[in-house]
Amino acid sequence: MKRVKLPLLVMVVASFALLQGCTPKTAGMDSAYLNKNRGASGAQISKAEAEQYSRQQGLSADEVRLENMKRHQTTDAIREGSSAIKSGVGAINSVKGLLGL
C-alpha cells in the first residue's frame, strides 16, 4: 500500500506546483507584456478613444450592410435574368407546340 501512496502523493504535489504557475497574468508573453507596460490604469481608454471606436464600429457595420445589399441585388438580377430566359423558352415551346413542330 505504501508503494501506491508515495507515487500518488508525488503526482498530486507536482500537479499543484504546475497549476500554481498557470495564472492569467503568466498565461502568455502578450499578457505579461501588456500587464508590465500598461498596468491597471492603462487598460482604461479615454472618452475620445471610445467615441472613435464607436464610430469605427458603425462604419464597419455600414460597410457590411452595403456589401450584403450589393450581393442581394446581384443575386436578384441573376434570378430575374434566368426567369426571363425560362419564360422565353416556354413561349417558344408553346409556339412550336401550336405549329406542330
Image (spheres, grey):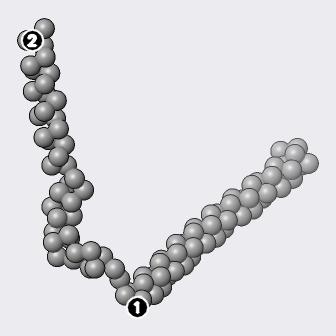
Residue 10 vs residue 49, the one in the foreground: 10
Report x, y in % for residue 64.
52, 72
Task: Give the x, y percent position of residue 3.
Answer: 8, 12
Callout 2 crowding tier (Cα within 10 Å): few <14, some 14–19, many ≥20: few
The residue under label 1 is which amino acid type? Ala
Q: Nearer the viewer, residue 25 or 70?
A: 25
At numbered mark 1, what does the secondary structure look like: helix, strand or loop? helix
Which disc is residue 65 wearing? none
**Circle nearer the viewer, 2 or 1:** 2
Left or right? Give the position of 75 relative to 21: right
**Quadrant into which the C terminus falls:** top right
Residue 41: name its quadrant.
Answer: bottom left
Q: Is residue 49 left or right of residue 79?
A: left
Q: Distance from label 2 to label 1 (Cα)?
A: 66 Å
Mark 2 = which residue? 2
Instruction: Kindly give the residue lying farthest to the bottom in the view shown.
Output: 48
The residue at which mark 1 appears reads as 48
In the rendered view, would you say 90 is above or below 73? above
Residue ID at (13%, 40%) = 17
Amino acid on which disc 2 is placed? Lys
For residue 88, what is the image quadrant?
Answer: bottom right
Query: Can residue 52 be seen by looking at this rendering?
Result: no
Q: Residue at x 20, y 69 (%)?
A: 35
Q: Secondary structure at mark 2?
A: helix
